[in-house]
Amino acid sequence: MTHRKQVLGPEDVRRAVTRMAHEIIERNRGVDDVVLLGMQRGGVWLAQLLGSEIARIASAVPIGTIDVTLHRDDIGMRPVTPGTSSDVPTEIQESTVVLVDDVLYTGRTVRAALDAVSDFGRPRAIQLAVLIDRGHRELPIRPDFIGKNLPTSSEEEVEVTPDGVTIIEGDDKA
């Protein structure tokens, strides 16, 4: 038996993205030298939405993607699926990189993203923006910008799209 519960709708996602964009601008005192990197796959669409909102409020920022596949600490425990790659659109040396992901859970993907970013240079700072923070951290990782804290059980899955956030329990989990 599967149970799906939508906890955020499209307007809620839009409001969270707008708030996060304002927080990024405020925390960095503008957007000079700010680069958004969406973590493949779920963070890419969110980085694009954040980038659009930041451009609407202040000015355009470079938006790219980061693939963490080969930097994961569980690489031998699960299949590696090639097909995505990193696209860092500008030099990140002395920039503030904002890593963007849809869901923060254990922190292991973020740890891998930190390693992946270092392949491209040494930024002045790295910040983390997530739409959903589920808790359950296994590593000392804390986001700088959060759309919504959403406590869940480890048996639940969280599906995040621009159209909303759904908690999935039961047999329909991905």
Image (cartoon, rainbow, N blue to C red):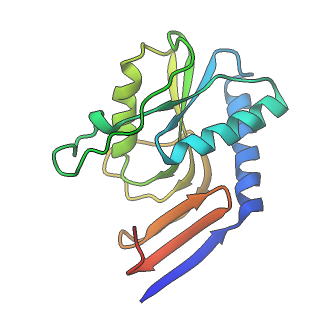
Above-or-below relation of 151 to 18: below
Give the residue displayed 33% in from the left and 40% down from the top: 82
Mark yes or no: residue 101 visible: no
Q: Position of residue 73 (x, y in %)?
A: 23, 41
Q: In this orientation, which residue lies closer to the viewer: 163 or 28?
A: 163
Give the residue displayed 60% in from the left and 64% down from the top: 165
State left or right for residue 84 relative to residue 22. left
Q: Residue furthest left?
A: 76
Residue 45 falls in which quadrant of the image?
A: top right
Give the residue displayed 48% in from the left and 16% down from the top: 123
Q: Position of residue 58 (x, y in %)?
A: 82, 26
Q: Position of residue 150 (x, y in %)?
A: 54, 63
State left or right for residue 135 relative to residue 71. right
Which quarter shows the C terminus?
bottom left
State left or right for residue 119 relative to residue 42. left
Give the residue displayed 58% in from the left and 78% down from the top: 5
Mark yes or no: residue 8 visible: yes
Q: Position of residue 14 (x, y in %)?
A: 75, 53
Which quarter shows the N terminus?
bottom left
State how many labels appear: 0
Above-or-below relation of 31 to 5: above
